[in-house]
Image (cartoon, rainbow, N blue to C red):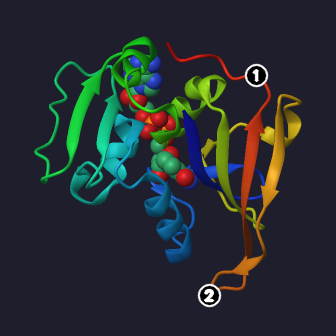
């Protein structure tokens, strides 16, 4: 399994249920990596998508403690499954190619699934913004190392960002 996330300089990822930065190139990067794959998320992240709909063309696995949550209707080529624990999420994706399973947030799900992730694809924006949810600081974790650092890009507002890949020295096996 891998993780994919966009963070600000202090690893902020969201505020009041929304993303901190909407950058088209970052959205394209997310879509290119996750298209046709399995994405695992918390129910608040699902709720943050347009219309609260699962991501098209992917197998959506949604973690919740809410017994009333019903999987929304899905477009063709899309599925959405509700699971109630990390163990159930891991069992649900166990048959998938691990390189095609993505932890996509939010903060609580990243925290719980990072130990199982081999790579973390991080879009890092060189700006600090008010946030109420954070990704773990991988630079402070000796188990994680940057293995690829892309060129600098700039948002329309002139904020520098880069696509970084971190590798986990000792991922826990999913099965
Ligand atoms: N920058 C990015 O790339 C990015 C990506 C995704 C999301 N986000 C942002 O992150 C924020 C949402 O993150 P969040 O942490 O608030 O919410 P979240 O992780 O999306 O969802 C939390 C929900 O998932 C449930 N859940 C988590 N682990 C569970 C488990 N083991 N078993 C059962 N249910 C479980 C939680 O239940 P409990 O109540 O028990 O915790 C809670 O109801 C939004 O602002 C969103 O925009 C940013």
Instruction: Point out which mark residue 156 bears.
Output: 2
The residue indicated by pointer 1 is: 170
Residue in the picture at 69% in, 23% down: 171
Say if 28 sits above or below 174 in the image.
below
Depth-wise, is mark 1 or mark 2 nearer the camera?
A: 1
Residue in the picture at 21% in, 57% down: 51
Element carrying mark 2 = loop
Crowding around mark 1 (Cα neighbors within 10 Å: few <14, some 14 to 19, many 20+) is few
Residue 79 position by quadrant: top left
Out of 73 and 15, give the one closest to the viewer: 73
**Does residue 52 appear in this view?**
yes
Residue 134 position by quadrant: top right
Instruction: Point out which mark residue 53 bears.
Output: none
Out of 108 and 172, give the one closest to the viewer: 172
The N terminus, quarter of image: top right
Left or right? Give the position of 134 relative to 26. Answer: right
């Amino acid at each position: 399994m891998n993780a994919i996330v966009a963070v600000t300089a202090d690893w902020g990822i969201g505020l009041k249920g929304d993303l901190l930065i909407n950058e088209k190139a970052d959205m394209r990067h997310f879509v290119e990596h996750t298209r046709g794959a399995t994405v695992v998320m918390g129910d608040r992240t699902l709720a943050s998508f347009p219309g609260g709909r699962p991501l098209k063309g992917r197998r959506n696995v949604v973690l919740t403690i809410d017994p009333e949550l019903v999987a929304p209707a899905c477009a063709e080529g899309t599925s959405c499954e509700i699971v109630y624990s990390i163990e159930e999420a891991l069992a649900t994706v166990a048959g998938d190619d691990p390189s095609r399973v993505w932890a996509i947030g939010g903060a609580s799900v990243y925290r719980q699934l990072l130990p199982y992730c081999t790579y973390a694809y991080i879009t890092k924006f060189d700006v600090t913004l008010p946030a109420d949810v954070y990704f773990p600081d991988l630079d402070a974790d000796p188990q994680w190392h940057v293995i690829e650092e892309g060129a600098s890009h700039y948002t329309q507002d002139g904020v520098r960002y880069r696509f970084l890949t971190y590798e986990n020295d000792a991922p826990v096996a999913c099965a």
